[in-house]
Image: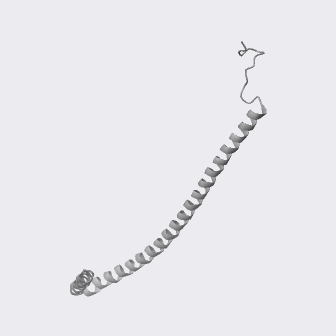
Amino acid sequence: GGGGGVGGSRREYGDTTADQQLLRQENDREIAKLHSKTADVKHMAIRINGAVKESNRRLRELDADMDGVQGLLRGSMRRLQTLTEKGGSTHLCYLVAGIVFVLLLVFYLLK
């Protein structure tokens, strides 16, 4: 019988030109799949980068807005402190009553 000895007819994978061609075709298919997956990852990274840039832009705008609000609050607190120091308790009562009135008015209008 013609088993697999040294001089036998046993074939190893890749021995013939046809086997090598099959290997090349399989490698080409795998390379194409890898290329497609790499392109997908690249496009995803580009979209993520765009989203991060947009988020950073919005955060900068929010930070600028918060700085403006903080400045307004500081100014209001200074004026309130000056008013309470100079005007005594009567002005403070009018101020509190005015604030309560405005808040109630806003609540009523939004309801």
Q: Is residue 57 above or below residue 33?
A: below
Q: Is residue 80 left or right of residue 46?
A: left
Which residue is at a point 57% across and 57% down the rendered structure image? 44
Q: Is residue 23 above or below residue 9?
A: below
Q: Position of residue 28 (x, y in %)?
A: 70, 44
Q: Position of residue 30 (x, y in %)?
A: 66, 43
Q: Is residue 25 left or right of residue 101?
A: right
> Which quadrant holds the C terminus?
bottom left
Which quadrant of the figure has residue 82?
bottom left
Q: Is residue 4 above or below residue 88?
A: above
Which residue is at a point 37% across and 78% down the rendered structure image? 73
Which residue is at a point 45% across and 74% down the rendered structure image? 67
> Which quadrant holds the N terminus?
top right
Which quadrant of the figure has residue 31?
top right
Q: Position of residue 3 (x, y in %)?
A: 71, 15
For this rendering, which residue is in front, 9 or 63? 9
Q: Position of residue 100 (x, y in %)?
A: 23, 82
Q: Is residue 4 left or right of residue 54?
A: right
Q: Residue furthest top?
A: 1
Which quadrant of the figure has residue 107?
bottom left
